[in-house]
Image (cartoon, rainbow, N blue to C red):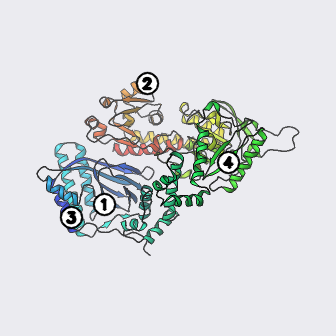
Amino acid sequence: MHEKAESKQVFTPEMIDMMASIWTRSVVKLIDVRFQNIVPQFPLEHYKMPSSMFIYTYGGEAQIQLNETIFGMERFGLVHGGKGSLLSILPKGESVKTYMVYYKAESTLFFKTGLQQLIEKVNPFVQQFGYMPSNPILLHDWFQQMMYGWNRGKAMDQLQSKSFLYQLIHEVYKDFERGEIHYLQPDPACSAKIYLDKHYGEPIMFQEIADMFGISGGQLTRLFKKKTGMSLQNYLIQRRIEAACNGLKHTKATIKEIATRSGFVDEKNLFRMFKKYYKMTPSDYRKINALAMQVDSIDNDSHFLYDESELVNLVKSYREGESSMFGQARRKEMILTAAISMMMLLSACSVGTPANSGGTANTIPAQTQHTTQTEGSETKAPEAVSQTRTITTVKGDVEVPNNPQRVVVDYLIGDVLALGVTPLGVARASRGEKEPVYANRITDSIKVAMEPEDIMSLEPDLIILAWSDERYKDLSKIAPTIYVPYGEMTTEERIHFISDVLNKQEEAKAVLNAYTSKIEEAKLAFQNAGLSDAKITIGEFSDKSNYIAGAKHAVGELVYNELQLQAPSKVQTDIIDADKYWGDISMEVLPAYTGDYMIFLGEGNVSTDNAVWNSIPAVEHDRIVKVNSALSWSTDIMTSSALIDYIVSQLLVLAK
């Protein structure tokens, strides 16, 4: 059976004529024309369109998402959407070249009443569509000339660019009028998933979702299961249960209110699902989590230490609702026996509990472990735990296993991965945080909050802590804990230090050699492109505030110290020489801190009508490299390596 959804022809002759009338009677302002080469490693994700836009893509195969609709593009594609739409372009193999035309349409006073009546029937400026144009080469030429004229900045050239916009609109409507066009194929499974993620709290009819793509409900179900591995119904239940759990843990709403908000038919339905998936009632789940939150909220001064002789009524919520309880005990041996027994029970019985990956469970505090077998003893500890080395750190000497098997890392995950070690546990990403460049390497790692109770459940034999040393004291009572003062170390120093901790010295040499070669190749590429003396400004920019990075910033250190690119004189004197991490610069004086090129960090935005911003030469000539948070938030060597590749490729394209 044909398993792809067939798009419907939605533009009737009457609609096309009406839309042409609206365009004719409206005042259209061309705001900007941009070009971007999007590579698979750094896709365009969730870009909020500041105005209505035409997006023309060509080159490799890609997935284009506009709000909740996902299109599949093979060679060419033309997409249109309105202001505020979320745009994502994800290349599947080769890079995808993209032109973006930003425009704004307003009604004239003369035609205002009649025009408003037409727009109420169909609004072409917010209309969402994607198709393969009948003459993609002609459109490519128009977009190229449109951008060339717009970037020259002269009134006559920009007038010509606007004329190309009208030619484009006419060509699009002629394609619709002929009716022999190929719409970009929607991906029903991905679009259905996005729809369920957004509307799980509402009554859902799967057939209505299928109708959006002109396919049967059974066909949508097969496509969804093939894509996600689960049925539509099971996925919807999972999303509703997650919402209910969140409500039970973090609100005081009644069970009935939570059931309604989460999309369940009634309170009984929520009870039935909780019994099925968690083997407990929603009320029990709330009580267990309330107790756990009470333990977490106790003042630090009153915490019981993990190696003290007593743990009083500690109740720990574990995984999907199971709980491990340690009652009052008088002897450390009793506590350890209870802890080990409970960990073994949970490992054997609970769904999703991590299996021991070869190392011996290290539930005994680090202070009680010995390096070698004591003279006269009759038993010998397992090799992975008993053989240790001493590592000198800023927190003092720490004994670590020679061959750590269950490593938990909170920040420098890319360094550990680069050395050939896949962590058992990694710090859970913050809400809204983009996936790191090594996301596909940690799919089997358990994401946890770096809290003592969560870490205990993993039974680690080594913890690597770098983000903050506030938890060091508590975590070091669970397993040997290494604090890495990453901000005070160069990349080379940090990799050598972590390799000593993991006993991966040979791997470190190979990693650093490859990294050094990448740096040297980048410098040579810059030299050949005439960029060695170019001035580069790095920062986060918006209408309200601008933060210019110095050489202490992760990206600043990479660009200024390692790649040895030049900073503008004001950035050098006011920020770098002053040994500042950031410089808080107002928009009025920002031009004095900008160079030939700008590296735009994060997801900020500057309005298109900001006169000061538009007067900056790097902005005027579109010499801006946008770096998302996945590449700018961490200093680990895998992220830095990917960032070098990205910055080099983008600057070389802009320098042509």
Q: Earlier in the sequence, mark 4 or mark 1?
A: 1
Residue under pointer 2 = 577
Tell me where residue 47 appears, x and y as whole percent.
Answer: 37, 49
- Look at the numbered discs 3 and 4 and tell me whether their residues touch, using CB distance below 8 Å: no
Secondary structure under the numbered disc 2 in the rendered image: loop
Distance between the alpha carbons at the discs numbered 1 and 3: 14 Å
As drawn, the label of residue 16 is 3
Distance between the alpha carbons at the discs numbered 2 and 1: 51 Å
State the residue at coordinates (59%, 50%): 445
- For the N terminus, the quadrant is bottom left
Tell me where residue 553 appears, x and y as whole percent.
Answer: 46, 33
Viewer-nearest of labels 4 and 2? Answer: 4
Q: Could you tell me the amino acid type at mark 2? A: Asp
Q: Earlier in the sequence, mark 4 or mark 2?
A: 4
Q: Could you tell me the amino acid type at mark 4? A: Ser
State the residue at coordinates (74%, 46%): 338
- Look at the numbered discs 2 and 1 and tell me whether their residues touch, using CB distance below 8 Å: no
Secondary structure under the numbered disc 3 in the rendered image: helix
- In the image, 8 versus 304, the foreground residue is 304
Viewer-nearest of labels 4 and 1? Answer: 4
Residue under pointer 4 = 324
Tell me where residue 343 appears, x and y as whole percent.
Answer: 70, 49
